[in-house]
């Protein structure tokens, strides 16, 4: 597999999965089930997962695949793998808030190096090119043809007036306490991996996450942010956030533009 082969495939699968998700999102009603970890799952999660998994296994049969909706895949281990969250932000989906994404990423030696984040209800799509740089695509999102793209880059942050983005569904007192350590010009809330993309485009300077996430929640957004010149570090010691951990669970982390002077936890 080459990056030139990978990017069109993951982009196409994200768009096709997004179309499936929007069919269900725009229907009169849909069933919400509860998984063993008490998190919700819908027919949209399952349909998107089936489409993406089949597409990735067909295109790249030799690559390990980890996906949120297939618990058997959580038992696999390797230092190079594809990782998928077919519908990140299920709560946003259920409440019809639009802030949900399709996430597909490639992890190599502990780091997400390529990825796509597609927000079908927001008509926004971000992905890395073969060279690793990050772009936002505008236009019709034709699965077969990459449309017009604009390079994206993190902000040159002013530490006296930072823009913060935080979770829409998980913004708690611990998050507020940490944000209050900074000189904040303004803050916004967003769901799913869109928060990484807002830092990647310079629409925000920093996204702190004081709460549980899994690697499939963060890998694609992390890849896009890295491609735009940003970084994701652990909350406790500011070392790089690594992937391929035993249970695929993340510690608390901070996604940030490099000019932000990070505060201690």
Image (cartoon, grey):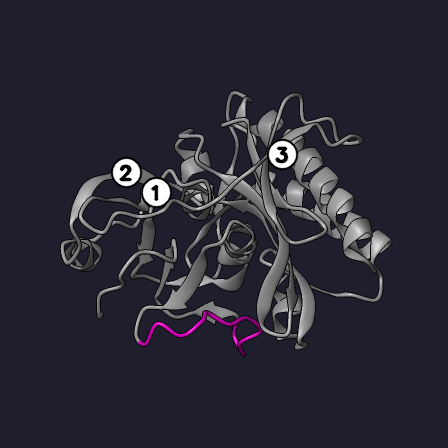
- What distance separates the C-alpha of mark 1 from that of mark 3? 25 Å
Left or right relative to 17: residue 227: left
List the residue tagged with mark 1.
204
Label 3 to label 2: alpha-carbon separation? 25 Å
Mark 3 or mark 2: whose residue is earlier in sequence: 3
Q: Give the mark, 1 or 3, whose residue is nearer the N terminus.
A: 3
Q: Residue at x 46, y 35 (%)?
A: 93
- The magenta stretch is 237-247
Which residue position holds label 3? 18
> Mark 1 falls on what kind of element?
loop
In the rendered structure, find residue 248 and report the number of the disc placed on it. Answer: none
217 w.r.t. 198: above or below: below
For residue 108, side relative to residue 55 (left or right)? left
Residue 18, quarter of the rendered image: top right
Q: Label 2: which residue?
A: 188
In magenta segment, residue 46: no
Q: Earlier in the sequence, mark 1 or mark 2?
A: 2
- Asked if the residue under mark 2 is in contact with the one under mark 1, i.e. CB atoms within 8 Å, the reply is yes
Which residue is located at x 33 percent, y 52 percent? 207
């Amino acid at each position: 597999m080459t990056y030139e082969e990978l990017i069109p495939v993951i982009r196409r699968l994200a768009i096709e999965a997004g179309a499936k998700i929007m069919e269900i999102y725009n229907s009169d009603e849909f069933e919400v089930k509860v998984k063993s970890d008490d998190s919700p799952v819908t027919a949209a999660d399952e349909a998107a997962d089936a489409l993406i998994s089949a597409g990735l296994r067909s295109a790249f049969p030799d690559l390990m695949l980890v996906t949120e909706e297939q618990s058997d895949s959580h038992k696999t281990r390797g230092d190079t793998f594809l990782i998928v969250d077919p519908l990140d932000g299920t709560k946003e989906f259920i409440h019809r808030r639009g802030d949900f994404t399709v996430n597909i990423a490639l992890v190599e030696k502990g780091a997400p190096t390529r990825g796509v984040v597609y927000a079908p209800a927001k008509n926004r799509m971000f992905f890395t090119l073969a060279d690793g740089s990050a772009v936002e695509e505008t236009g019709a999102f034709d699965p077969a043809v990459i449309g017009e793209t604009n390079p994206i880059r993190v902000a040159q942050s002013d530490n006296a007036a930072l823009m913060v983005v935080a979770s829409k569904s998980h913004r708690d007192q611990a998050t507020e306490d940490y944000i209050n350590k900074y000189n904040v010009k303004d803050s916004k809330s967003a769901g799913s991996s869109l928060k990484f993309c807002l830092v990647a485009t310079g629409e925000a300077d920093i996204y702190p996450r004081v709460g549980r996430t899994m690697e499939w929640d963060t890998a694609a957004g992390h890849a896009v942010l890295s491609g735009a010149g940003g970084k994701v570090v652990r909350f406790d010691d500011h070392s790089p956030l690594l992937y391929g951990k035993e249970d695929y669970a993340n510690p608390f982390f901070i996604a940030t533009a490099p000019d932000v002077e990070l505060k201690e936890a």
